[in-house]
Amino acid sequence: MTEPEPHGTPDEHAADVAELERGSGTAARLFDVRSVIGGLFVFYGLLIGGAGLFAGADAIAKAQGININLWTGSSMLLVGAFFLLWQWIRPLRHDTPAG
């Protein structure tokens, strides 16, 4: 039995490997955990902050005069914005090994 001959030249294989490495870097950026954490904090911050905007006097009185939903929602929005800004300023980089 003979070995099957490889298809393509070494230059074509190198180009294919380079393309796959670029694609894997893009996939890593798509699944950056900072975007998930930031998005969830922003989403829940909007929900809780919105509940705080429409809080009644009874709910505020239960929290000793502090609109806790508004403060918590605002804090969550800030944390979520921090994570999303951090991802935007310092994106993941896919470093290829030298060789």
Image (spheres, rainbow, N blue to C red):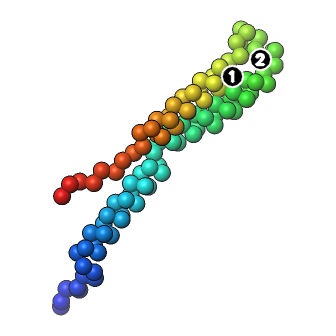
Looking at the picture, tell me which residue is in the foreground, 60 or 23: 23
Q: Are marks 1 and 2 in contact (CB under 8 Å)?
A: yes
Image quadrant assignment for residue 56: top right
Position of 79 relative to 92 (above/below)? above
Residue 28, given in percent of the width and then of the height, sits at 42, 51
Secondary element at image label 1: helix
Position of 68 relative to 94 (above/below)? above
- Which residue is depicted at the point 58% across and 38% down? 40
Count of numbered circles on the image: 2
Q: Nearer the viewer, mark 1 or mark 2?
A: 1
What kind of residue is marked 1? Asn
For the C terminus, give its image quadrant.
bottom left
Residue 59 circle label: 2
Secondary element at image label 2: helix
Residue 69 circle label: 1
Position of 53 relative to 83 (above/below)? above
Which callout, 1 or 2, points at the residue further toward the start of the chain? 2
Residue 53, given in percent of the width and then of the height, sits at 76, 24
